[in-house]
Image (cartoon, rainbow, N blue to C red):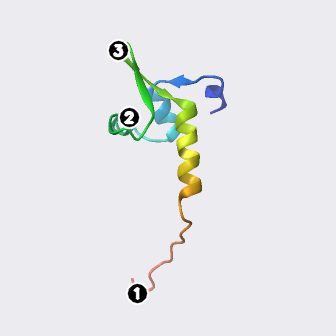
Amino acid sequence: MDVHKNRRWISPREAAEYLGCHIQTCYSWIYEGRIPAARIGRSVRVDLRALEAQLEQQITNRPVTTRTKDKAR
């Protein structure tokens, strides 16, 4: 989504679209503090740069695991 690269703050709907999740999931993550966001007046806005940095950190800190199919099934 290069459209958002020049913007810092996006709506929860745009964040859900960016992350590929449902809007309600995005709101849950915001209220749990898992997505960096701020209330601006009555609106909630997601900090896109902080979100991208958080995702990058999760990717680099996650150990690589491989899945193997269970042959017994």
Q: Residue 40 at x, y = what percent?
A: 41, 16
Q: Residues within 10 Å of mark 2 (few under 14, many from 20)?
A: some
Q: Amino acid at mark 3?
A: Arg
Q: Residue 3 at x, y = what percent?
A: 64, 26
Residue at the spot x=54%, y=45% of the render?
Answer: 55
Residue 72 vertical placement versus 22 (above, below): below
Q: Residue 9 at x, y = what percent?
A: 53, 23
Residue at the spot x=51%, y=77% of the render?
Answer: 68
Residue that label 2 marks:
30
Residue that label 1 marks:
72
Question: In the image, which is nearer the foreground, mark 1 or mark 3?
Answer: 3
- Asked whether, in this view, residue 48 is left or right of residue 23, the answer is right
Q: CA distance from mark 1 to mark 3?
A: 55 Å
- Going by the picture, which residue comes out furthest to the top? 41
* Label total for image: 3
Residue at the spot x=59%, y=55% of the render?
Answer: 60
In the rendered image, which quarter is residue 49 located in?
top right
Name the disc covering residue 42, or none.
Answer: 3
Q: Earlier in the sequence, mark 1 or mark 2?
A: 2
Question: Under tag 2, what secondary structure?
Answer: helix
